[in-house]
Image: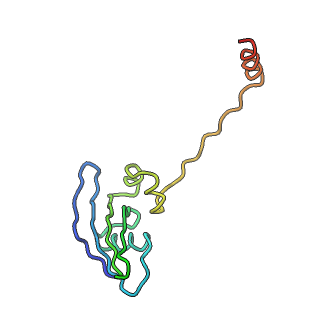
């Protein structure tokens, strides 16, 4: 697999680099997002966890894929900026622990029930 960086643009507002790449993989299957993230990271000189693959389009029968990626300074910067579904696709999503709801006191529930009936 050979990767070629077509363009690299710095986006200072989001503190990231936006990459357009093309990938030649003749005779092989379409690479996974994880493989492409590793290739982009090695080509740019960054860590794999800092790369988010935005889109990939494979040319049918040609063994060529084109796509876009975003490279952040850290994985935390990516998590704070990217939408959840992109994080899940790129295995960067960390689920936050849910807060447990406190059970209502028994007297409060009965009082609320009585108030509804009387109203």
Q: In this image, 103 relative to 24: left or right? A: right
Q: Is residue 115 above or below residue 95?
A: above
Task: Judge whether residue 49 can be spotted in this image.
Answer: yes
Q: In this image, 71 relative to 6: left or right? A: right
Q: Which residue lies furthest to the bottom in this view?
A: 27
Task: Judge whether residue 51 can be spotted in this image.
Answer: no
Which residue is at the front of the view, 98 or 115? Answer: 115
Q: Is residue 108 above or below residue 64?
A: above
Residue plotted at (38% across, 69% down): 37
Q: Give the quadrant of residue 7.
A: bottom left
Which residue is at the front of the view, 52 or 100? Answer: 52
Residue plotted at (65% across, 39% down): 100
Q: In this view, does 14 lie above or below 3?
A: above
Q: Give the quadrant of residue 70.
A: bottom left
Q: In which quarter of the image is the C terminus?
A: top right
Q: In this image, 41 relative to 33: left or right? A: left
What x and y, as percent, mark residue 22?
29, 74
Q: Residue furthest top?
A: 118
Q: How many labels does the image show?
A: 0
Residue plotted at (33% across, 63% down): 69
Q: In this view, does 8 lie above or below 32?
A: above
Q: Quadrant of the N terminus?
A: bottom left
Q: Colour scheme of this structure image?
A: rainbow
Residue plotted at (46% across, 59% down): 92
What x and y, as percent, mark residue 18?
27, 60
Which residue is at the front of the view, 99 or 60? Answer: 60
What x and y, as percent, mark residue 68?
31, 64
């Amino acid at each position: 697999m050979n990767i070629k960086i077509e363009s690299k643009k710095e986006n200072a507002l989001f503190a990231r680099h936006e990459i357009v790449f093309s990938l030649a993989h003749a005779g092989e299957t379409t690479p996974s997002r994880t493989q492409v993230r590793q290739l982009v990271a090695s080509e740019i000189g960054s860590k794999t966890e800092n790369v988010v693959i935005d889109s990939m389009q494979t040319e049918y029968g040609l063994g060529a894929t084109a796509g876009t990626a975003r490279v952040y300074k850290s994985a935390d910067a990516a998590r704070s900026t990217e939408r959840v579904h992109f994080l899940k696709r790129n295995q960067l999503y960390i689920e936050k622990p849910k807060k447990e709801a406190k059970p209502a006191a028994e007297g409060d529930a009965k009082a609320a029930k009585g108030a509804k009936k009387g109203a």
